[in-house]
Image (spheres, grey):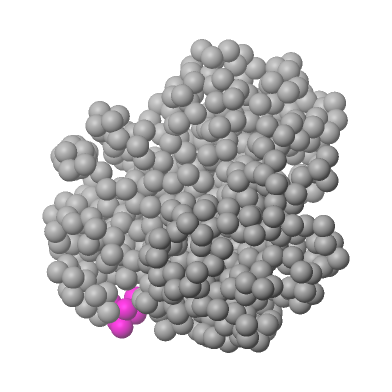
Amino acid sequence: MRKSFDTIAVLDFGGQYAHLIANRIRRLGVYSEIHPNNVDPALLRNCRGIVLSGGPSSVTDENAPPMQPGVLQLDIPVLGLCYGHQLMAKILGGTVTRGEHREYGLAAMRIVADDPLFAGLEETQQIWMSHGDSVEDPPEGFAVLGSTPDCRVTAMGHAGKKLYGLQFHPEVTDTPNGMRVLGNFIDICGCCRSWNAETFKEEMKRDIEARCNGRRVFLLVSGGVDSTVAFTFLNAILGSDKVMGLHIDNGLMRKEESTEVICYLREHGFDNLQIEDASREFLSALAGIVDPERKRTIIGNMFLTVQEQAQKKFGLNADEWILGQGTIYPDTIESAGTQHSDKIKTHHNRVDLVLELIEKGLVVEPLAQLYKDEVRQLGEQLGLPHRLIWRHPFPGPGLGVRVLCSDGKTAAISEADERQVGALAAADGFSASILPIRSVGVQGDSRTYAHPALVSGPRNWKALEALSTKITNRIRGVNRVVFALSPVCGSYRLIKADLSPERLNKLREIDHLVTEALHASGEYDTIWQMPVVLLPLVNGRGDECVVLRPVKSQEAMTARFYPLADTTLSTIIEGARKIKGVGDVFFDITHKPPATIEWE
């Protein structure tokens, strides 16, 4: 069937966006498939075009993922992105160097030469960068097509050979005209745009039927968008008599969430759904654990343990059932799901035990190649109600990754970084310091575990956005910036704290307050997600600080922080003061990258 479609191959060098590139090309009507970075060029001869993905490595590293040079000699258009751009330049004789400044986030590119790749675009373009290395000099025969103040060779091309390189990421939504650039490349390739999502949906159905091979599916249903769409899709394909859903209350859910999930799903006809209260077991296993990766692994393993216990309780023959999960692609790619990708964080549905079951063919994941926006489209096609489909994403580990823990030992803060943060903030009329905690980030396709900077001053969102980008680009020890919404109460002290019921309940109350405020203001449907994070950091009164993290996104691979209305923030701050033990309120003003959406 696929031979009837023009195909563009994506060579995967481990970038966070490799599958997003393929997804975007398919959305433009052309079939796209992923190949390993060292694929034999002979296997690509029938492709109309080739895209080289980004990746976490530096092309100057000894063990950097290679590419067979013959790929560039197939007389097929090639587009290199980020690492792929640099690798193309290096192979063909250009110069790649470490940049004086890293670029993570928005940048303005000026198009300096006419080329079909930028057809229909104005001279200045907003683009999304995520890199440390840069092409200093393009290969012979290549023209510089676009530049930014910090990156002279932001775009290069050899019109005769139809070889192109872009330092930026056109596949992400924060490059507004990125789809136009990819569309222009598709036209350069001479592709017929005849691929469509409905065809892919039919492929998914056949794949599920083949994987199940007559067996029934035991699906873990959190009640979020992904697991609910997966549950509905499996019911539609296999029939409700061959699917059983299990909702596990792990003690890490939001306020009254498990009760709401069960009631809501059963109201909409899902009678093949069971519930298990395993909160005591989860919290016991997590007692005293502070490392975020260990928490995620424990939670993922506990889900499997409870699932196995439930199977026995319900008298299900393990040989007749396989595990189902609502995994989507960002879960796999952030968990180092490809050969050269960097592990950003281990998702609960990608712990070792799950990977072993997948290897044995005992797991079915109907949404594993989809992104959140595609999952929602599928949900709409399946007739699910708007309120359910557009619920904010909620991580599988729940509040377990939103209650940050600590052994009370302050991570070392560079004095040089502290001075530089203060100087950068002061130059823009703010004051700033580095907080003695750390959070997960993603910079240059690699995982970082670094400090947030705390900024205080006027609530000027545009200026704060610029300052946040400047700090995270220039200071390697900082991957996130927060703004003090409520008055700063002197210095902050790190405390010893784990996942106690008291701390979880504290977060439940502030999280519920925030959710209600968003519904009241009408902003709930405007933003993508609103994590609220409890920090093991106390102010001068001894109360723990919290962080608001509203973001806008489409596929979770990139995100922009979203400034809430002043009236909404006033409601939240006033309500937070009434919650016992809640201290200062911070607002996360960092995009993704360099910060992940969740703090852990």
Q: Nearer the viewer, residue 84 or 247?
A: 84
Report x, y in % for residue 560. Answer: 38, 52
Report x, y in % for residue 374. Answer: 57, 38
The quadrant of the picture occupied by the N terminus is top right
Report x, y in % for residue 224. Answer: 51, 32
Report x, y in % for residue 448. Answer: 48, 67
Q: Nearer the viewer, residue 565 or 337?
A: 565
Does the magenta-highlighted stretch encompass residue 412?
yes
Does the magenta-highlighted stretch encompass residue 101?
no
Q: Write down the region rendered in magenta.
A: 411-418
Q: Residue at x 68, y 58 (%)?
A: 189
Q: Residue at x 59, y 49 (%)?
A: 24
196 left or right of 357?
left
- Is residue 19 something that shows in the picture? no
Q: Is residue 290 above or below residue 211?
A: below
87 left or right of 594?
right
Q: Is residue 275 above or below residue 195?
A: above
- Residue 112 in which image quadrant: bottom left
Q: Is residue 140 above or below residue 385?
A: below
